[in-house]
């Protein structure tokens, strides 16, 4: 055995195997599908492991009972002590991370949008661990953030280990997230379109095979390990009255505004906690105490609310009870986020949508009674669409969860109404809203990182035609005779930028030969820095109206010249590359048509 290991090391066998696999993936798309399926298997294992760890933690609050939100009663001292203890542990953990000056973890959307799919596996393990701790101690947040983080990070690690192309790594990140969400909700179609709408940012038929493979493999692992819950069947109404359609649009608009209130309230709660407690490590403990107090009123506020959602779908509550549960769950969720607990709003938004639908059905019952099940399922899809921002994903999730295909049109109408309302009145989802608060302008997982990576320093021309600003016009004409550059950069004795001169102005009869070149100078204060990204460079050309701008450093020293024509050409080339990646054209293998039987040459 020792001799075998020494032989493998001496011949660098692992590196050769990776190189061979990399070559296979780059030449045959089926191997990329295989890697996607492997990512799905690993994502399913992560979902199963995190779910079991969370259930073990739930036993601290309710011994012998699995999921917290489905409880009818809880022990007062347990429901107060366990969230506080979990909050203290989380606060201590986060404080240690801050002392180590760890970088902020990158989530799958941000990774695909800005970093070409690159994610840190170590940082993702921290996110997953904090998510399990938060949910396990009863914080009113879901596990889906940790699920998708781990699934995507493992897939990203596979892609980076094989040194795949940027587009392939981004695709694998989407496959990992698709597998995690599909396994978590037992909804393969919803998991696949979660990746298309949020992580990858586009749908292409060539990408369906790897994403679907990852989702199905993750779902199989979750079912084999017992991580999935039994199916829920909601009875579809026999008929949907014509008046239901406009009312469903109103329900979608109401869910949209409820989602906006939830997202804004979470941001304001974070600010309020920072103002109340300067010691950041104590904030989760205070949040845990407040959430535990709300759980004394109704245990359904604990954890993600997944079991409570399933119970309310099967047996919808009356309007008064639904309104009470809605207010309690919103308050618990906002407090959990504001206090610094880790988790997402995916699970919570589904439960809140069911409650909003029940309240809506009760309000309109005296005027236009609608089936209660119709309102709850439509509300679930609409509010989740408003918060998460993936309408097709949420439509499929609502239908796969409830097995109510007869309500497809109703759920779609409410979800579309919610999506349009949020886009017109707010413009953000929960993920993009948090990016906005950090100063990032990210709308989806569509790759925009190349705009920041391609800077002026990479595009500028360092060899410029430059002359001293005090040079006379007549002398400059003589020096440039026989080669007329389009632009002349002027500088002083210390090579500091003094403006630009267009050669048409230099050769104009209006230019006085005895005057210095500085008399013809333009764009004295309009320059670019080498760190400027392509997007800002394009904006600078549009703002100034100049065909070219000088590139200077912080001291004003001339470094080069950049023309608008070259920037726009590079911009068009990158956009075309991104379009091909999104359309999946790089994976299409074209084969020539066979020759005709008469030997007349290939078909056109």
Image: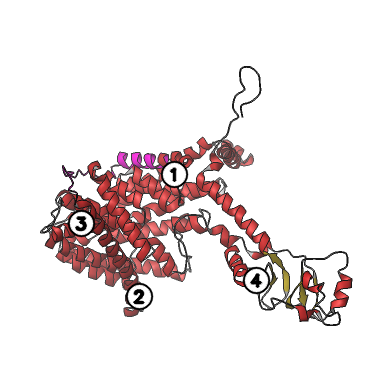
Percent x, y of residue 443: 44, 60
- Mark in front: 3 vs 1: 3
**Secondary structure of the magenta portion, mostly?**
loop
Q: Say which quadrant the N terminus sits in.
A: top right
Q: Residue at x 66, y 21 (%)?
A: 600
Residue designated by label 4 = 529
Residue 215 on the magenta segment? yes
Residue designated by label 1 = 39
Residue 112 on the magenta segment? no
Identify the element where label 1 is drawn. helix
Q: State the separation of the CA atoms marked 1 and 2.
A: 38 Å
Would you say residue 535 is visible in this rendering?
Answer: yes
For the residue carrying disc 4, how many other residues have a C-alpha within 10 Å: few (<14), some (14-19), or many (20+)? some
Percent x, y of residue 300: 19, 59
Q: Which disc is residue 271 wearing?
A: 2
Q: Are marks 4 and 3 in contact (CB under 8 Å)?
A: no
Q: Which residues are magenta?
A: 213-242
Q: State the separation of the CA atoms marked 1 and 4.
A: 42 Å
For the residue carrying disc 2, how many other residues have a C-alpha within 10 Å: few (<14), some (14-19), or many (20+)? few
Marks 4 and 2, the one that precedes in the sequence: 2
Image quarter for residue 561? bottom right
Residue designated by label 3 = 357
Percent x, y of residue 419: 34, 57
Q: State the separation of the CA atoms marked 4 and 2.
A: 35 Å
Marks 3 and 2, the one that precedes in the sequence: 2
Q: State the separation of the CA atoms marked 4 and 3.
A: 54 Å
Q: Residue at x 34, y 52 (%)?
A: 391
């Amino acid at each position: 055995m020792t001799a075998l290991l020494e032989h493998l090391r001496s011949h660098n066998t692992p590196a050769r195997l990776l190189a061979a696999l990399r070559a296979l993936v780059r030449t045959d798309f089926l191997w990329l599908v295989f890697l996607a399926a492997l990512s799905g298997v690993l994502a399913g294992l992560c979902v199963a492991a995190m779910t079991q760890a969370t259930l073990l933690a739930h036993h601290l609050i309710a011994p012998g009972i699995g999921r917290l939100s489905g409880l009818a009663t809880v022990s007062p001292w347990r429901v107060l002590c366990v969230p506080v203890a979990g909050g203290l542990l989380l606060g201590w953990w986060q404080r240690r991370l801050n002392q180590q000056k760890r970088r902020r973890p990158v989530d799958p959307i941000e990774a695909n949008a800005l970093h070409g799919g690159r994610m840190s596996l170590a940082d993702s393990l921290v996110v997953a661990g904090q998510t399990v701790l938060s949910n396990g101690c009863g914080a009113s947040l879901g596990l889906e953030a940790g699920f998708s983080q781990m699934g995507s990070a493992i897939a990203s690690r596979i892609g980076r280990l094989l040194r795949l192309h940027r587009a392939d790594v981004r695709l694998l990140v989407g496959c990992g997230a698709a597998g995690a969400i599909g396994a978590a909700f037992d909804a393969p179609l919803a998991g696949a379109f979660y990746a298309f709408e949020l992580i990858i940012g586009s749908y292409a038929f060539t990408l369906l095979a790897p994403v679907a493979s990852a989702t199905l493999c993750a779902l199989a692992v979750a079912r084999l390990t017992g991580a999935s819950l039994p199916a829920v069947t909601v009875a579809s109404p026999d008929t949907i009255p014509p008046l239901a359609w406009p009312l469903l649009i109103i329900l979608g608009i109401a869910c949209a505004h409820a989602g906006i209130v939830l997202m804004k309230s979470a941001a304001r709660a974070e600010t309020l906690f920072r103002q109340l407690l300067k010691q950041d490590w104590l904030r989760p403990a205070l949040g845990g105490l407040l959430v535990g107090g709300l759980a004394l009123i109704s245990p359904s506020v604990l954890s993600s609310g997944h079991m409570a959602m399933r119970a309310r779908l099967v047996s919808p509550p009356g309007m008064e009870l639904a309104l009470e549960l809605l207010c309690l769950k919103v308050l618990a969720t906002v407090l959990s986020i504001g206090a610094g607990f880790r988790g997402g709003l995916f699970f919570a938004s589904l439960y809140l949508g069911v409650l909003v639908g029940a309240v809506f059905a009760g309000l309109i019952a005296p005027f236009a009674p609608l089936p209660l099940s119709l309102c709850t399922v439509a509300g679930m899809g609409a509010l989740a669409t408003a918060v998460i921002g993936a309408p097709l994903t949420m439509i499929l999730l609502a239908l796969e969860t409830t097995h109510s295909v007869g309500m497809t049109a109703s759920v779609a109408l409410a979800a579309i109404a919610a999506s349009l309302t949020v886009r017109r009145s707010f413009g953000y989802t929960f993920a993009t809203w948090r990016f906005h608060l950090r100063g990032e302008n990210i709308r989806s997982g569509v790759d925009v990182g190349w705009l920041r990576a391609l800077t002026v320093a990479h595009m500028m021309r360092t060899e410029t035609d430059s002359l001293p600003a005090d040079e006379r016009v007549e002398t400059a004409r003589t020096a440039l005779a026989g080669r007329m550059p389009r632009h002349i950069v002027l500088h002083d004795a210390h090579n500091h930028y003094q403006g630009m001169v267009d050669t048409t102005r230099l050769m104009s009869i209006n230019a006085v030969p005895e005057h210095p070149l500085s008399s013809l100078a333009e764009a004295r204060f309009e320059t670019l820095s080498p760190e400027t990204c392509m997007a800002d460079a394009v904006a600078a050309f549009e703002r100034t109206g100049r065909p070219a701008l000088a590139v200077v450093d912080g001291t004003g020293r001339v470094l080069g010249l950049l023309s608008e024509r070259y920037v726009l050409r590079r911009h068009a080339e990158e956009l075309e590359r991104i379009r091909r990646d999104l359309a999946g054209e790089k994976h299409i293998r074209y084969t020539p048509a066979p020759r005709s039987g008469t030997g007349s040459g290939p078909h056109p």
